[in-house]
Image (spheres, rainbow, N blue to C red):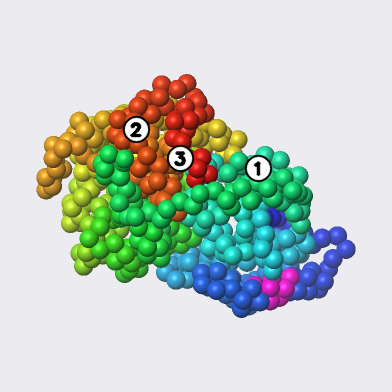
Amino acid sequence: MPDPVQPPADGAPLPEGADVDSETERLRTATQTVAAGLKARAAVATGDAAAVLKATALMAGDRTLLKSATKLVASGTSAESAIWEAADAVATQLTALGGYMAERATDVLDVRARIVAELRGVPAPGIPDSEEPFVLCAVDLAPADTATLDPAKVLALVTSDGGPQSHTAIIARSLGLPAIVAATGTTALADGDLVFVDGITGTVTRDPGPAEEEIAASYANRAALPDFDGAGALADGRSVPLLANVGSGTDAVAAAEAGAEGVGLLRTEFCFLGRDKEPTHEEQVEAYRAVFDAFPGRKVVVRTLDAGADKPLPFLTDDTEPNPALGVRGYRTDGATPGVLARQLAAIAEAAENSRADVWTMAPMISTPAEAERFAGLCAAAGLRTPGVMVEVPSAAVLAGQILQRVDFASIGTNDLTQYTMAADRQLGALAELNDPWQPAVLHLIKATADGGRAAGGATSEGSATTGAKPVGVCGEAAADPALAVVLVGLGVATLSMNRRALPAVAAILRTVDLAEAQRLAGLALAAPSAAEAKELVRAELLELERFGL
Ligand code: PEP
Ligand code: MG
């Protein structure tokens, strides 16, 4: 995947040897080429990708944009600088208009990058267009890139950045794509190389031969996992509900078909990625209802918008923050942009009202008991019955008992909890070893959270009567690792929520242990001095992993 296009210098003059006429012609040809290319791709694309391409093609042919840019060229500016500046002005105007027009600002900026790439004679940014299926090798993918990622074309993903819990990895899992993140040596690969990508060992081999063919055959021969029967349980029959992480109604339908016992995490920001304007009440109700309708009579946990850091939403986040992962993200955006959260809760409540799903609502990035209490208040005001929090910040894990006295449940986001416990950016390939939920420090915090749920049992949040432990689930990627899932249950976690594709593997391994054994394995992992040793000790005891090639 080509690198992002770097901006030209502000007001750069006409290139040497060029005059206004030749530079105008160069600009015109570049815009026409880009528009024609996008149009041709839109004609053969389907679904979201076709819509994105069509909108971008229209923008590339936009006369106003070209007119303002040629004016700048006429005053002596280079074609690159002129289109850059002209597009900036158009995008600003569109944003100010709001609504549908504001959403088109992203298309203008995308077109601008494509035109500049064309002028420079370098490949267009974004996912490459290819007739032939290919292995996509990139630094990392932006969430918006995934809108045009066609799983029929992309055979596997290899990225030099991104950790195993980064959004690229999460998306690759949801598409069922073999993927290697935080790969070293990717710069040695060139376009057109034939490669063998082994997502299990995390290796890429150039010019594969008989050895690789043998590996592929051995994977094809491993025992097939039984389909998930829709009832997660341990060997002693103790129930461990297995839920799904979803980002849309379509995902939810697929998860229900895969046997998920409900939704443990609806990432609402995924319904509105790439939007620079707050979605309307009606749009939100429709998006949430589509998920609720897939799970009548079942639990659906809705997470309020988790904007910021790896999931920027321009209407909520400030892209100039020096340290976005430690910035105004998740629940914290309610302080900087009040109103969006209350309006989202109202939309969730309306969608829940006429649905048969059992709707629970939680906030991401809660750090203190006071925040939990305030969120519960907002939920109550919106008429939402079951408020909860995500435990993603170490402070929330440490004070889980107090937090869970104020809300009805907690769901541990191990992706962020690991990033913040280890102080290691989850998007950085170089820190992938630290960014591992098997880190014993992370496991101790998971145990502290589950203990907090037990301690808070019996306490009630306003208007709801709960007895026994307050439920603590896990919805980070850790829950999708079958060996780690056993440890999580041993640490006291009640439910596990994962990508639907992980359900059969997790269900099969959970059924091989009883609670006492899960607790024993959790004890081994807690006492281990490193993530690698924790993982090795536990895996050595779960013999079924090998049979299924897990
Ligand atoms: C997490 O942090 O573990 C989580 C589930 O949320 P996200 O991956 O969307 O940040
Ligand atoms: Mg998170």
- At x 42%, y 37%, the residue is 484
- At x 76%, y 44%, the residue is 188
Instruction: Read off the residue under disc 1.
Output: 203
In the drawing, what numbered circle is on residue 518?
2
Q: Gap between marks 2 and 3, in whole Å?
A: 14 Å
First reached walking from the N terminus: tag 1 or tag 2: 1
Instruction: Say what amino acid the circle numbered 3 marks.
Output: Glu
Q: Is residue 511 above or below residue 151?
A: above
Question: Does the rendering let one see residue 343?
Answer: no
| Ligand 1 lies under 8 Å from the Cβ of mark 2 | no
Q: What is the span of residues highlighted in magenta in the rendered image?
A: 30-38
Picture coordinates of residue 503, whole percent (x, y): 40, 51
Element type at marker 3?
Answer: helix
First reached walking from the N terminus: tag 2 or tag 3: 2
In this view, the residue in front, 243 or 8, is 243
Instruction: Say what amino acid the circle numbered 2 marks.
Output: Ala
Instruction: Read off the residue under disc 3.
Output: 544
Element type at marker 1?
Answer: strand
In the drawing, what numbered circle is on residue 439?
none
Instruction: Say what amino acid the circle numbered 1 marks.
Output: Thr
Picture coordinates of residue 133, whole percent (x, y): 66, 63
